Image: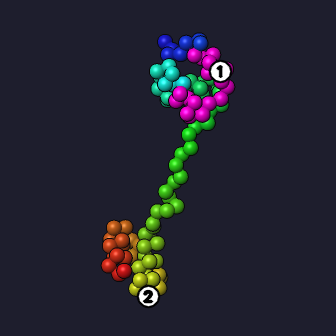
């Protein structure tokens, strides 16, 4: 049994394409979940534009190598001479760097 009447399906088809916000508005109008409406839109092969995903934080994440490099600068030594520190856990490296500064 479908939650979608012929009238609702016709309304979806007549719109032609949807954004996430339009799908959410349709869901609210007919007391359906947004996920259900998006699924129905896709099953009808209608154009759908999902909401934009937030930018990944991967580019701003501090790596252990970055911490070891900062420690090397703080100790005025070469990275190569202490690069074995990269095997330590991140928390220990952060604590060491804070003590140096």
Percent position of residue 21, x then y: 55, 33
Element type at marker 1?
helix
Q: Which is nearer the eye, 100 or 67?
A: 100
Residue 37 visible, this angle: no
Which of the numbered marks, if any, corresponds to residue 25? none
Residue under pointer 1: 13
Percent position of residue 84, x then y: 41, 77
Q: Is residue 13 magenta?
A: yes
Q: Residue at 60% of width from left, 17% of height from top?
A: 9
Q: Which is nearer the eye, 95 or 33?
A: 33
Choose the circle earlier in sequence order: 2 or 1: 1
Q: Residue at 44% of width from left, 87% of height from top?
A: 77
Judge depth for marks 2 and 1 and give the one in front.
1
**Residue 18 quadrant:** top right
Q: Residue at 51% of width from left, 54% of height from top?
A: 56
Element type at marker 2?
loop
Q: Is residue 43 magenta?
A: no
Q: Residue at 32% of width from left, 79% of height from top?
A: 99
Span highlighted in magenta in the image: 8-25
Furthest residue in direction bottom, as rendered:
76
Which quadrant is home to the C terminus? Answer: bottom left
Residue under pointer 2: 76
């Amino acid at each position: 049994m479908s939650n979608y009447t012929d009238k609702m399906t016709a309304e979806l088809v007549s719109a032609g394409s949807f954004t996430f916000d339009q799908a959410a508005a349709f869901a609210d109008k007919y007391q359906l979940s947004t996920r259900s409406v998006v699924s129905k839109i896709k099953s009808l092969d209608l154009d759908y534009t999902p909401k934009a995903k937030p930018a990944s934080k991967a580019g701003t994440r501090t790596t252990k190598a970055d911490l070891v490099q900062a420690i090397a600068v703080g100790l005025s030594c070469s990275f190569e001479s202490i690069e074995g520190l990269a095997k330590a856990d991140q928390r220990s490296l952060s604590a060491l760097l804070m003590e140096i500064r």
